[in-house]
Structures are given as structure tokens and as C-alpha cells.
Image (tube, rainbow, N blue to C red):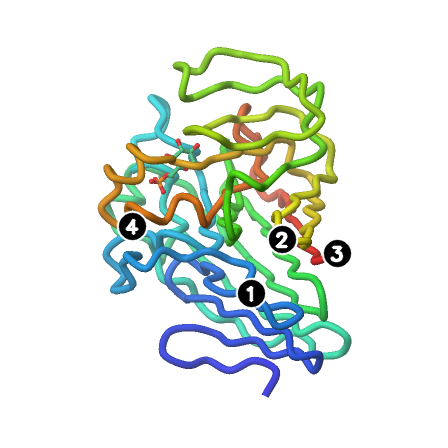
């Protein structure tokens, strides 16, 4: 079976042996195995009972990144902590493609009060031998324009974050959330991690590559997403997160394609599409 719904998750299996797992809760990708290796980090302390966003995988941030005065929603919005509908298997030719959907009518009343728009999110996960493609379509089913942020909050599994480098961010401006949001220009060809990092790189080229440090490289190609967030909580933040092991920060790096530095405006009746392809090279 190329795609099977088991235990509130959808398991994708590609003839090459690649697999992926998507929890209905948040339509969160929680595993991607390519060339026999797990590529995605999920914390051993992740809460999986639907009471909190899953700490790891690829949670979907929508319609707000962080918190905002404008929108009274919890950090990173509601997409990552609602149960999505499994629309089903779309195709299983070269790629195994499945789709999920979330509509305003599936939200809690409190969430609908805070974000009072009619919308439909459609999220497609496509698995091939070496790639995982995730595409989000936002449909404004209202008459009025709405604004949103979105982000594919991708947690990559790494053997030692201090040996990881991210290529492709040189010459981009970034907002450094560790330094109160101050703006800097990236002067390094390779971005490395040796302390807490929480940066919003703005207007980033569509192609980045992450050297995992063990000979493996993961390419990230984004489309219609302007920014990239790079995050590692390091020692103290890791200790402050109840659903993240104190010793786990060396084993992950978040490289998150999104549109977060500015709001995306979407007129009534219109659709917006954005996404990313992760490829093992
Ligand atoms: C990142 C943010 O995208 O997500 C960080 O830039 C934040 O500031 C991190 O700490 C994790 O957020 P959360 O809500 O999952 O703990």
C-alpha cells in the first residue's frame, strides 16, 4: 500500500524504500526516511496526545508566526494544533502523493473568533526516492481580504549541530530574535551553529543546502516563500522547553521556509500556493 492511515497518521511508502509519516494532528510530517536514514527530528519528549503541537517534524505555522498584536492567537497559529482531514491518496506513479485539508469550520469557536475568516488549507505531501515535497495552498473563501504568515517549521535530524553548515544565506539580511530582533547582514558563506540561534532571514534565494556533517547534504528548494528561519535553542532554551530533552539540541537544526517577515495579503476568493522540496543529495 503506498499510503495507509494507521493510528491517526498516514504512512507513505515509496517503491525505493523511502517512507514518510504524517500525523493528522497538524498534518505534521513526523518522519522521512530516505536512503535508509531518518532525516527528521522529533523530540523524545514530544507530546503526541493532541494537546500541544508536536515538538519536531514539520509543523505548519499558519496564520501567524510567533505572536502578533494583530491576531490574538497562540504562538505560530492554529494549523499545527488541529486535526486535519485526510483527503486521500492523489497519485502513486513516480511519487506517492497524499493530501490533507483544514477548514475554518474545523477550528474551535475561540480560534474562529480570533481569526474570523472562511478559508481552506490544502496540504500535499509527495514522496519520491530522494525527495519530500510539501505544498500548502491557502484558499480565501471569504469576501474580504485576509493576511497571513506561514512557515514549514522543518526540524532536521543531525548527528552534531556544531558540524552542520547552511549554504545560501550569504548577503541576506536577518532579524536576530536572540538579540531582540536587531537586523544584521549575513557575511558568512556558510552559517554554522555554536550557541542559541533564532534568526529570520529575509528575501532568501529559493535554493539552500544544509550539510548535515556526516557526508550527507539536504537541499531545500522553496517556492513562493520569501524567508527562512534558522533555529536551535541551545542549552538554556532547551531546558526551558518542557517537551524537548535537555540533551537533544545537538541533534537538530530547524531550517524553516516561510513568509513571515511580512504578511501575505490574499483577496477574497483567491488562492495562494507555497512549498518546499527537501532532497537528499
Ligand atoms: C521558531 C521561532 O520558528 O520556533 C522561535 O523563531 C521559537 O522563536 C521556535 O522559539 C519554537 O517555537 P515553539 O512555539 O514551537 O516553541
From mark 2 to mark 4, how far is it between C-alphas? 22 Å
From mark 4 to mark 1, how far is it between C-alphas? 21 Å
The disc at residue 281 is 3
Disc with the residue nearer the chain's start (3 vs 4): 4
Q: Quadrant of the C terminus?
A: bottom right
Confirm or deny contact between disc 3 and disc 4 (CB under 8 A).
no
What residue sits right under mark 2 in the picture?
214
Quarter of the image for residue 198 reads: top left
From mark 3 to mark 4, how far is it between C-alphas? 29 Å
Q: Is residue 70 above or below residue 24?
A: above
Pick the front one: 121 or 153? 153
Name the secondary structure under disc 2: loop
Name the secondary structure under disc 3: loop
Q: Is residue 211 above or below residue 23?
A: above
What residue sits right under mark 1 in the picture?
32
Crowding around mark 1 (Cα neighbors within 10 Å: few <14, some 14 to 19, many 20+) is: many
Instruction: Please identify, in this view, whether the residue under mark 4 or under mark 1 is nearer the observer.
Output: 4
Disc with the residue nearer the chain's start (2 vs 4): 2
Q: Residue at x 43, y 45 (%)?
A: 250
Tell me the quadrant of ligand 1. Answer: top left
Relative side of 158 to 232, left or right: right
What residue sits right under mark 4 in the picture?
245
Residue 62 locus on image (x, y percent): 45, 42
Q: Quadrant of the N terminus?
A: bottom right
Q: Residue at x 66, y 58 (%)?
A: 133
Q: Residue at x 31, y 57 (%)?
A: 46
Disc with the residue nearer the chain's start (1 vs 3): 1
From mark 1 to mark 3, how far is it between C-alphas? 15 Å
From mark 2 to mark 3, how far is it between C-alphas? 12 Å
Amino acid at each position: 500500500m503506498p499510503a495507509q492511515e494507521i493510528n491517526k497518521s498516514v504512512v507513505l511508502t515509496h517503491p525505493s524504500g523511502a517512507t514518510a509519516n504524517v500525523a493528522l494532528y497538524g498534518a505534521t510530517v513526523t518522519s522521512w526516511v530516505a536512503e535508509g536514514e531518518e532525516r527528521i527530528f522529533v523530540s523524545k519528549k514530544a507530546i503526541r496526545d493532541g494537546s500541544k503541537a508536536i515538538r519536531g517534524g514539520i509543523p505548519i505555522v499558519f496564520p501567524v508566526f510567533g505572536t502578533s498584536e494583530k491576531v490574538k492567537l497562540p504562538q505560530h497559529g492554529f494549523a499545527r494544533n488541529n486535526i486535519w482531514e485526510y483527503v486521500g491518496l492523489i497519485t502513486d506513479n513516480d511519487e506517492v502523493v497524499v493530501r490533507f485539508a483544514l477548514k475554518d469550520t474545523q477550528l474551535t469557536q475561540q480560534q474562529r473568533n480570533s481569526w474570523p475568516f472562511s478559508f481552506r488549507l490544502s496540504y500535499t505531501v509527495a514522496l519520491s526516492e530522494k525527495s519530500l515535497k510539501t505544498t500548502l495552498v491557502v484558499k480565501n473563501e471569504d469576501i474580504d481580504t485576509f493576511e497571513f504568515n506561514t512557515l514549514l517549521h522543518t526540524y532536521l535530524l543531525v548527528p552534531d549541530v556544531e558540524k552542520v553548515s547552511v549554504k545560501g544565506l550569504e548577503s541576506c539580511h536577518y532579524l536576530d530574535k536572540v538579540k531582540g530582533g536587531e537586523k544584521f547582514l549575513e557575511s558568512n558563506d556558510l552559517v554554522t551553529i555554536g550557541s542559541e540561534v533564532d534568526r529570520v532571514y529575509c528575501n532568501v534565494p529559493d535554493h539552500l543546502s544544509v550539510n548535515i556533517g556526516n557526508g550527507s547534504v539536504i537541499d531545500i528548494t522553496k517556492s513562493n516563500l520569501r524567508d527562512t528561519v534558522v533555529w536551535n535553542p541551545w542549552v538554556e532554551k532547551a531546558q526551558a522547553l518542557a517537551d524537548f530533552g535537555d540533551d537533544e539540541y545537538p541533534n537538530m537544526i530547524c531550517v524553516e521556509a516561510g513568509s513571515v517577515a511580512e504578511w501575505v495579503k490574499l483577496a477574497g476568493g483567491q488562492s495562494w500556493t507555497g512549498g518546499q522540496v527537501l532532497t537528499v543529495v
